[in-house]
Image (cartoon, rainbow, N blue to C red):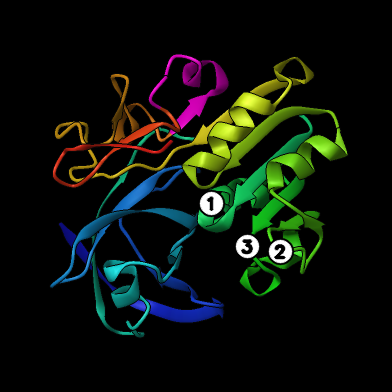
Amino acid sequence: MKFSEIASAKKIGKDFFELSFSIDSEVKPGQFLMIWVPGVKEIPMSVSNLKNPITISFKAIGETTRKLSTMREGQRIFYRGPYGNTFPEPKGRAAYVAGGTGIASLLPLIRIHPGDVYYGLRTAEDIVYGEIVNFVSTDDGTLGFKGNVVDLFIKEDKEYDEVFVCGPEPMMKYFHDKIDRRKYGKIYYSLERLMKCGVGICDSCSINGFRVCKDGTVFEHEQLDMMDEFGTVRRAESGRRIFLK
């Protein structure tokens, strides 16, 4: 476990925050850190800006993220990593499909290789990073397309060499099942699961034998074809299987 002093702390949207701090390792697009705040749990977090001071972007929705949202410049933040594999650098026309906080994982790629950004939210007041978004959907129709971001992507019916997807698991499962795979060269997904170790030992993040922390978090479309647990089963902290459908 290492620590760093927070260089900046900002609220950038409704319950959405950025913390920046320097680390002594290079981070690549798609990798994550295990973040710990004394008194609460250690959790995995995507890195939304790769250059020191790096940035983590998150919504305050759980005990640890709510605690992180109260931290200020000069306080210590503890971390391990970076861990996980990486997104390949896009080489052709790229699309980025994000749901909610999934935008954080895609930001480094979007800044390196701009493309069409599709962003799905519950309501208009949830939007962040609006300056990079080309197409937006909201569940309640208060901004952009009314409905989910997958249906928006399908409706636009554009051609892309590579598609990068990150968001809630049900949204990514829906994308995987609904998309016409023949229209796109490569499709990559950044998965999120309960992680305790981050290095492939505890198996809490396993999906059909794939360890999200070690074999991912980035997987190709064809790998998800082999995961019948994806979008249907996940594990509680106790290890109990929870059925999502």
Alpha carbon distance from label 3 to label 2? 7 Å
Name the residue tied to disc 1: 102
Residue at (53%, 51%) from the top-left corner? 102
Which quarter of the picture shows residue 184? top right
Checking the image for residue 140, the label placed there is 2
Q: Nearer the viewer, residue 187 or 87?
A: 187
Alpha carbon distance from label 1 to label 2? 19 Å
Q: Nearer the viewer, residue 151 or 222?
A: 151
Image position of 58 with respect to 165: above or below? below
Dot placed on the residue nearer the N-terminal end, 1 or 3? 1
* Image quadrant containing the N terminus: bottom left
221 part of magenta stretch: yes
Name the residue tied to disc 3: 122
59 part of magenta stretch: no
Which quarter of the picture shows residue 13? bottom right
Label 2 CA crowd tier, 10 Å (few <14, some 14–19, many 20+): some
Q: Percent position (x, y) of residue 244?
A: 40, 38
Boundaries of the magenta span: 218-229
Q: Percent position (x, y) of residue 146?
A: 78, 56
Kind of residue at disc 3: Arg
Disc 1 versus disc 3: nearer the observer: 3
Residue at (42%, 72%) from the top-left corner? 19
Dot placed on the residue nearer the N-terminal end, 1 or 2? 1
Q: Secondary structure at mark 1?
A: helix
Kind of residue at disc 2: Asp
Alpha carbon distance from label 1 to label 3? 13 Å
